[in-house]
Amino acid sequence: MAKEMGSRLGTGEILFTEMQARMITVLVPYDQLSRTHGAMAKAQPSTHQILMIESSSMLSSRTWHAQRLFLLLSASEHFAVELETEGFTVHRVRASSLRAGIQEFRTAHPGQEIIATQPRSRKLQSVFDELRIDVFIDDSFLTTREQFASWAAGRKSLTQEHFYRWQRNRLGYLMQGSTPLGDVWNLDNENRLPPPKSGYQWPTPPTFEADDIDRSMLDRLSNSEYSLWGSPADETWATTRAGALQQLSWFLANSLAGFGPYEDAMPKETWSAHHSMLSPYLNLGLINPQEVCDAAIERFNQGDVPLASIEGFIRQIIGWREYINGVYWLFPAQYEQSNSLAAHRPLLPLFEDPAATKMACMKSTVSDIEQRGWAHHIPRLMLLSNLALLSGVDPQEFLGWMRRVFIDAADWVMVPNVIGMGLHADSGTMMTKPYIAGGAYIKRMGQFCGDCQYKPALRVGDQACPFTTLYWDFLDRHQSDFAGNHRMVQQFSGLRKLNNLEEVKTRAQEVLSGLSDGTV
Ligand SMILES: Cc1cc2nc3c(=O)[nH]c(=O)nc-3n(C[C@H](O)[C@H](O)[C@H](O)COP(=O)(O)OP(=O)(O)OC[C@H]3O[C@@H](n4cnc5c(N)ncnc54)[C@H](O)[C@@H]3O)c2cc1C
Ligand code: SF4
């Protein structure tokens, strides 16, 4: 078809319209802004046109973090403009929903073939199925859904570490033949340092100046009636592929070397520690995991990045990120509704308002999220999720909150991370034991406790750390749920040794009601 059209080009407007009618339309959702992957890989302005749909129900259905909505809108508009500069016709459709937008486009352009890349949420998948949109494999992930399913087939447990080794072998990162570089697969034992006491120079992340498109999106949002939460967009996040690449270069030059040792640390003087802050760009398609890993390996080959740092970083991408995507598509749609620990407490007020808690660690973390929509994986897991799990917050309410406030939130990544990893709401399908900890862990890995009115070592009394009290109370409440879990033997043996369990349980009730009314 392209050849036939090429020979008739330039013969007038009627032919141009006819040509558009014969063009293939690529539907580009706002989280697939990649020119080189999926349905966009072979698209050319002479044969393809672009359809981008802004769904008003997506914009107005929830109270989004202002920066998250800004990033989605501004990054997709930048992408549309880049495609226009390349010569593509871009149809921007505003509709009540993505489904309605596709239907409106079809009514206005009858007979058009619409293609897309495999969508990144089950909800969109069902719209594509219903409207018979042809999809291309989402090859911006390093592992297809079929490859993951075949890895998982017949396994008793879906241990991430096993998947990670399979990935290392298959993709060849940090391998010498079939042996891992340095003869060790995983150097996490070297990667659990607490923050240095003082005098450490943390890297300062780059900032990104707003351009005209950013400014017009900021105006639009500030004059809109959307319900927004958090600080308005500043210069923290880039909205283009060029910005994402700049963030990657900065990370490789300034932060990768220290990534490993301080990966789990929660220091006070920096909001970003040695993390890459690449997740929003990876999740929007502005950069892809392969180029990130290739560039990190190239940087490692220069010789001054420790093996523990490069191994830890590569594991996050080819291990965790790919694993999470794999399990999202492997598990049934109902997985998202799991609530195996029967947790029904409404979302705690402190998640919406950091002034609604006296816990220094939670106040600081939720304030950071309010400011930038981001926290690294340990605050997400060992503070936010830990507190929600220990206090029995409804998993779906907590999932809804995280989806609204994180800059990098996406269905495929939030659902397994929250339901499986954070809240253990899936009967242990994903993780063999819950990630729970009392104040001692937070004291060791963070620098909050010195400024807190609670004491991490205390489990009873007015000054008891809520994490410490609730940790023991949780174990007591859920003894039968974890009976027979050999990985929790030590924790339950600690519980049996407590000499004041009744007092702990009484204090836990006070803490729980204080958390629910925003006074703890
Ligand atoms: C409860 C919970 C919710 C989370 N929700 C999200 C989310 O909505 N979006 C998101 O991208 N990540 C999520 N994560 C994973 C992780 O916290 C973030 O990817 C990471 O903090 C992003 O910051 P970074 O880019 O600096 O990551 P780095 O620490 O620099 O790590 C590099 C990359 O590894 C990948 N990665 C690492 N861990 C994970 C993981 N568990 N799942 C998926 N990718 C991972 C990310 O792409 C990240 O950019 C969640 C983790 C938890 C425990
Ligand atoms: S004492 Fe407890 S609540 Fe306070 S900062 Fe430490 S861990 Fe958090």
Image (cartoon, rainbow, N blue to C red):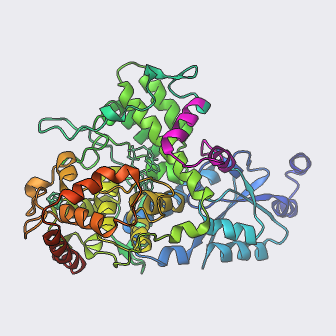
Q: Residue 223 vs residue 33: left or right?
A: left
Which residue is more in the foreground, 512 or 202?
512
Where is residue 24 shown, x and y percent of the image? 79, 57
Which residue is more in the foreground, 210 or 375?
375
- Residue shown at 86%/58% (left/top)? 12
Where is residue 60 shown, x and y percent of the image? 48, 78
Residue 285 seen by the camera: yes
Q: Which residues are magenta?
A: 140-169
Where is residue 240 shown, x and y percent of the image? 49, 50
Residue 255 seen by the camera: no
Task: Identify the image quadrant of residue 247.
Answer: top left
Task: Identify the image quadrant of residue 17.
Answer: bottom right
Where is residue 287 shown, x and y percent of the image? 53, 44
- Residue shown at 64%/43% (left/top)? 151
- Name the main secondary structure of what is drawn in magenta: helix
Location of residue 255 with respect to 334 vertically, above or below: above
Location of residue 84 with respect to 166 vertically, above or below: below
Residue 69 highlighted magenta (yes or no) = no
Task: Identify the image quadrant of residue 519.
Answer: bottom left
- Residue shown at 87%/60% (left/top)? 15
Q: Quick one: quadrant of the C terminus?
A: bottom left
